[in-house]
Image (cartoon, rainbow, N blue to C red):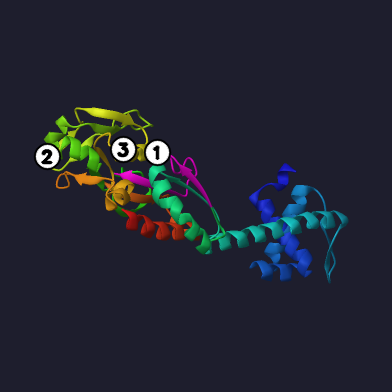
Amino acid sequence: MSGIASIESFSGLVAFAATVESGSFAAAGRKLGLSASAAGKAVERLELRLGVRLLHRTTRSLAPTGEGEVLYQYVARILKDLQEAERELHLIQNAPRGRLKISVPTVMGRRIVLPAFNDFHALFPEILVDINLDDLIVDVVEEGYDLVLRLGELGDSGLQARRVGPHAFMTCASPAYLAQRGTPRTPADLAEHCCIHYRFPTTGRLEAWAFKGEPPARALKPSSILNDGEALASAAIGGLGIVQVPRYLVKDDVAVGRLLPVLEDYTENRGSVSLLWPPRSAEVARVRVFIDFFAERIAAQL
């Protein structure tokens, strides 16, 4: 059977099936865009490779032999499956359907992406979203991701990217804490305050605070060190100290007065929020609609 598993044999199988279905090499050739002679020779090479005669040839007609009938049943089934596969790929390419594997940072996924999934699913019910909430920097191509959401400065990854908006930060604390300890007016004043720091769970490093016009500084009196962004916000609301966190994480708390911003003239953005995907991936409909939908939703929350 190894002799049939070649490109040349496949072309012979296609010519053979077309000949059986149309009744002549000339008709098979027209169907395949070949001459009658080319179609006949393709079948002859196939017979030679298999060592059996597949067609009874007369001056008026062609008909499959017993061996040819057996082979035709298999070939017809394979060609039908290939046509179905081609049709399915065309539908996937041009209609928003199929599996979509994405990676999203944990907190942004919980706060912004997941709450929008109900609306997305209502619009595109045939897309199966396989979402990984993780702060690891995944290998998009090697691990088979269709799309990832990244925060901060982007390196030269070879991926396509769409900037959604700024990765904006806010320095803030609870009204109770500020009433007790006072409000810092400059970054240097933080030396007299309790500052709650974030530890990256992937590296174990403390996240440095950054301010305009000054190098990133680590606060001198951390009251707590946490490795979860939402816990960081909760600690600040509880009055444990000052935090510097992404704006989307605390903007609702600031809006209702649970937290108050400080050092607003000094706090700056840290790169961008971006969607990234492998080259040409956005040509697939399910990827394209996800990018358009969530770029708008995420931007509105930043």
Is residue 49 at all visible to an observer of this figure? yes
Separation of residues labelled 1 and 3 (CA atoms): 25 Å
| Kind of residue at badge 2 | Thr
Q: Please, what secondary structure does the residue beneath circle 3 have?
A: loop
Q: Within 10 Å of the Cα at label 2, are there few (<14), some (14-19), or many (20+) other Cα atoms?
A: few
Q: Which residue has dot 1 on it?
A: 135
What amino acid is found at the position of numbered circle 3 in the picture?
Gly
Q: Earlier in the sequence, mark 2 or mark 3?
A: 2
Say which residue appears at 27% left-offset and 37% top-offset. Answer: 239
- Gap in angstroms between the C-alphas marked 2 and 3: 23 Å
Q: Are marks 1 and 3 in contact (CB under 8 Å)?
A: no
Mark number for residue 238?
3
User: What's the magenta region?
Assistant: 129-152
Label 2, label 1: how far apart the Cα atoms are: 31 Å
Lower position in the chain sequence, tag 1 or tag 3: 1
Tag nearer the camera, 1 or 3? 3
- Residue 281: where, in percent of width, then height? 45, 54
Task: Indicate left or right for 81 with 300 as reference.
Answer: right
Q: Which residue is mark 2?
A: 186
